[in-house]
Amino acid sequence: MANHKSAKKRARQTITKSARNSQTKKSIRTCEKNLRIAITEKKTEDAQKLLVTYTSKIGKATQKGIYHKNNAARKVSRLAKHVNSI
C-alpha cells in the first residue's frame, strides 16, 4: 500500500486508467471480431463500414497511448488488405 500522498494519488489514477484502457481494448477486439466475421462471410459492404469504424477506434486508442502506433498501423493494414481482397 502506498504511504505518501502522491503515491496514493498515483495508485488511484492507475486504477482509473487501467479500467478505461481495458474497456477500450475490449470494444476494439469486439469490432475486430465482427469485421473478421464479415470478411469470412464475404459481406463486402458490411466489411467496409466495419473497417472504417475499426480504424477510427484503434486510431483514437493509439493517440491515447493504449496501442503502439506501429501495432495499430499493422493491424489496420492487414485487415484492409483482407477487405480489399473480397
Image: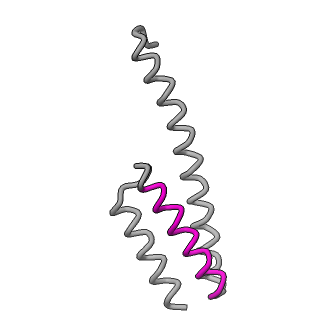
Q: Residue at (51%, 24%) from the top-left corner? A: 12
When the figure is inspected, residue 70 is found, relative to residue 24, above or below; the finding is below
Q: Quadrant of residue 38?
A: bottom right
Q: Residue furthest top?
A: 3
**Residue 15 to residue 60: above or below:** above
Q: Main secondary structure of the magenta part?
A: helix
Q: Which residues are magenta?
A: 44-62
* Front one among 4 and 75: 4
Q: Residue furthest left?
A: 70
**Where's residue 26, x and y in %?**
59, 53
Residue 49: image location, x then y, percent: 62, 78
* Residue 15 location (% of width, % of height): 52, 30
In the displayed structure, does residue 30 sit left or right of residue 77? right
Image quadrant assignment for residue 30: bottom right
User: Above or below — where is 21 with respect to 59?
Assistant: above
Residue 60 belongs to the span the image colors magenta:
yes
Q: Is residue 72 left or right of residue 36?
A: left
Left or right: residue 84 compared with residue 72: right
Q: Residue 76 location in percent, x, y? A: 45, 72
- Does 2 appear in magenta? no
Residue located at (56% from left, 51% from top): 24
Give the position of the C terminus as an image quadrant.
bottom right
How many numbered discs? 0
Give the residue displayed 46% in from the left and 13% down from the top: 1
1 versus 44 height, above or below: above
Q: How is the image coloured?
A: one colour
Residue nearer the viewer, 65 or 33:
65
Left or right, 5 with reference to 44: left
